[in-house]
Amino acid sequence: MNATSHPLVPARSPQDREMDSHDNKRVDIEDLIQSLGSFQAVIFPVTLTMLLSSFASAVITDPDAASLMAQSYLVYKAEDGDSDSTLLGHAFVNAIVIVGFFIVATFVIVICYKFKFTNFLVGYLFLSCVCLLGLLGGRLVQVSLSNFDIAVDVWSYWFIMYNFAVVGVLAIFYQKGVTTTLTQSYLVAISVIMAWQFSKFPEWTTWALVVVLAFYDLCAVLTPCGPLKCLVNLIQQEGRPLPGLIYEAEVQTTFHSTHAGGPDTAYYQRGRPFPERTESNDTSVASSSCSFTRRRSRQESDEETGESGREPLLAESAPPTLRDRLVAFYTEFNPSAIPRVDQVLAMYEGREADLWADLAAKYGVDNAEDEDNTIKLGLGDFVFYSVLVSRAAVFDVSAMWACLVSILMGLGGTLFLLNVYKKALPALPISILLSVAIYLWLRFVLIGFIDVTQGVQG
């Protein structure tokens, strides 16, 4: 399956798209809030995946899998007596060959999407998920049971793995009636399984692979002829959904402040469905399609500032409750359903996103803006973040934590740039290159300095 990264695409409202290129480069508080919300939405799953992968790579060892990976994917295999320069050269050749496979797979996906072979893509992803969860996941479980001396009969093992794979495919692709948490959990599990498998590459090849992937991701997303750039342009032009293993999380961006002139708390909120409101004192506008609180354009702010002198940055009305928003929605689309509001709320307790999605489908409401307030991160990004941290964990736990923090710092910087430049950006380069630099410094400079210091003191 294609394990390359999914480019980060900014969440943009229709008003944002109307801004000219000069205004798009300006940074305001909304850009910062959106960046923080995006980072908050992905920091937990990314960190959890890296920690689980590191634990699996360090504790659950499988020499047979490492040998099989070397025979299947590597052009050159490490030999005893090879010099460092030879190992480095062979490692980069191996990495280029593996990335070449990713490039071919990505172009195949582009061609299938362009010529509407969607069923082929869906079938391929179904088969990939079944193999990942059932076979590779089963291998991980087998090795774990063997390492920890846990006895399980063969019938129970296959029953558990079969159900694990089937439920995973349904949770990822069908999703109807499945909680978002379960879907996200399976995506994290797939990432851990793939990272555990990739971590079986030799050390030199692993580091060369993540570096080459970082530069490939940069070219694939930002160059005009890059495969991921072509894919993003096709999706934007045709508007058809692309099936894929993508982690999607809702961005909750809420900002609270108190005006100096009174005790009332003002709120700025993006990302929650909000039916149309007509109060004259409300500065936010929402469409009848139960969309999000609109982001005010800078042109409007400049014009109103010229008329009124100084305008508060945030709207002064408190956010309505879920019940109020649901009543407003039914008032707009189906007044006869208002008496059943409490029943609907009880039915969808804890599943607000599913509630608005079902309402949009039932009443034919255009809920396109709902997708604009989500952050999407390809599982390839999860996997190769985890591969890097797992390889560092095999060397030393301090290196693992240093690389993990570096990746999160790079991801936060990437998300900030995403909201500043309003264009698709690769998620790997900043995080990967920063982590590799930190690892090299720690391994060859810091640890050497500590050893010398301890030798002098001794």
Image (cartoon, rainbow, N blue to C red):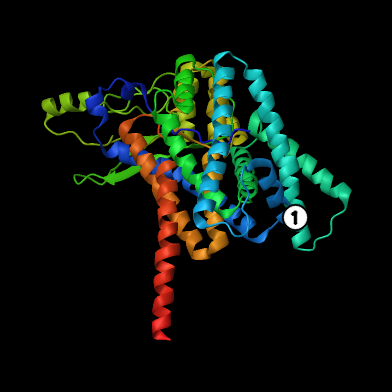
How many C-alpha atoms fall within 10 Å of the one at disc 1: few (<14), some, or many (≥20)? some
Give the left or right position of residue 188, taking residue 7 as reference.
right
Residue 251: image location, x then y, percent: 44, 38
Residue 46: image location, x then y, percent: 51, 47
Give the left or right position of residue 8, taking residue 1 as reference.
left
Secondary structure, mark 1, is helix
User: Looking at this view, is 225 or 341 the one in front?
Assistant: 225
- The number of numbered discs placed on residues in the rendered structure image is 1
Q: From the image, which quarter does the N terminus lie in?
A: top right
User: Given the image, on which type of amino acid does mark 1 rest?
Assistant: Val
Residue 188: image location, x then y, percent: 60, 44
Quarter-of-image position of residue 165: top right
The residue that mark 1 highlights is 143
User: Looking at this view, is 130 or 373 the one in front?
Assistant: 130
User: Looking at this view, is 67 or 260 the one in front?
Assistant: 67
Q: Residue at x 59, y 34 (%)?
A: 348
Q: Residue at x 30, y 36 (%)?
A: 30
Residue 9 in view, yes or no: no
Quarter-of-image position of residue 37: top left
